[in-house]
Amino acid sequence: MARITIVTPARAGTRTGNRHTAQRWARLLRARGHRVRVCVEWDRRPADLLLALHARRSHASVEAFARTHPERARVVALTGTDLYRDLPASREARRSLALATRIVVLQDDARRLLAPALRRKTRVVYQSSDARAGAAPPRDRFRAVVVGHLRAEKDPFRAVQALAQLPATPRIEVVQIGDAMTPAMARDARRWMRREPRYRWIGGRSHAVALGWIARSHLLVVSSVMEGGANVICEAARIGTPVLASRVSGNVGMLGRDYPGFYPLFDTDALARRLLRAAGEPRALARLKTALRARRRLFAPQAEGAALAAVIDEALG
């Protein structure tokens, strides 16, 4: 079994997708007998393989490991902003991919954006969730939940903007979970709560609490501008809560091109219509549930563990 160092730019204790991914991958690889450490950067301790999350932000670790151990395996995982924002302009991101023995993407649409030479060493590892809660939304209202830190890449207020366009009946509410990444984001959230009484921002919550809110909602809204492969979609699929999502590559790769719950990015009117239809037409909501159920197996922990292990075995040769 191999000694594996996972490098993630997200520090211990942070509630970010990269940190959750690193910790989950460490558990999955340990379960297969590997010795795994998780670090913010490679500290030059012995490792047979470096697994780096985020091509640009982990570049220094990838470069140092390749220089020190050119014969050892390097796996670089493209987690979102590095693929959809950094890669065209960042020499560091491109260099990380050139140095990689294998590249991991978190959903299958991501491969389309890579050069053919990189695609040949790229593998898809869908993220997973072991969420055991069952969907149990309230009966006296229709609840949509938004889960994710408040930052520009998430287009965080699109759901409440759509809500503000809807009549008071049927009763629809939006609950938003996530830390504000800037004081301006916090001010905007509070301003929306004063303006729209059906909207609540409850700030950052533990992973378990966030899962509970997904289970107690009729819909999850994923409004991201860019997304590597939202783990919150995996969680909603495993719980059984349908999703409305912006039609961007990361969401399409997770949900499938024919998923009926997409709306055009930044299109508040379209999202408002989707919300109203889901709240008022049981068949529309059932159609979303059926389509998401068809993707559920992709997000099982066993599937993620097997796919990740295959990449590691390949890289190690």
Image (spheres, rainbow, N blue to C red):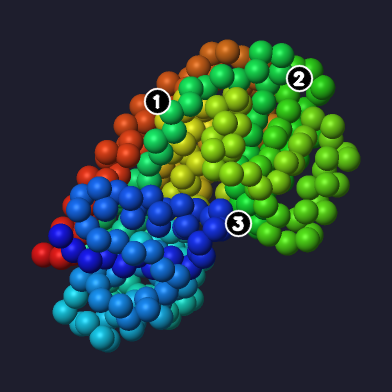
Residue 222 - label: none
Residue at the farthest right position: 194
Query: Marks 3 and 2, how far apart in space?
Result: 29 Å
Estimate how packed mark 1 is, as few (under 14), some (14 to 19) or many (20 or more) residues with alpha carbons within 10 Å. some
Which residue type does callout 3 highlight?
Glu
Residue 25 in sight in this render: yes
Of pointers 3 and 2, the one earlier in the residue sequence: 3
Q: Position of residue 31 (x, y in %)?
A: 25, 48
Residue at the spot 26% in from the left edge and 53% down from the top edge:
29
**Disc 3 to disc 1: CB gap under 8 Å:** no
User: Which quarter of the image is occupied by the N terminus?
Assistant: bottom left
Q: Mark 3 points at which residue?
A: 153
- Counting from the top left corner in percent of width and height, residue 66 is at 27, 81
Q: Is residue 107 visible?
A: no
Name above or below for residue 2 compared with residue 280: below
Mark 2–mark 1 CB contact (< 8 Å): no
User: What SS does tag 2 mark?
Assistant: loop
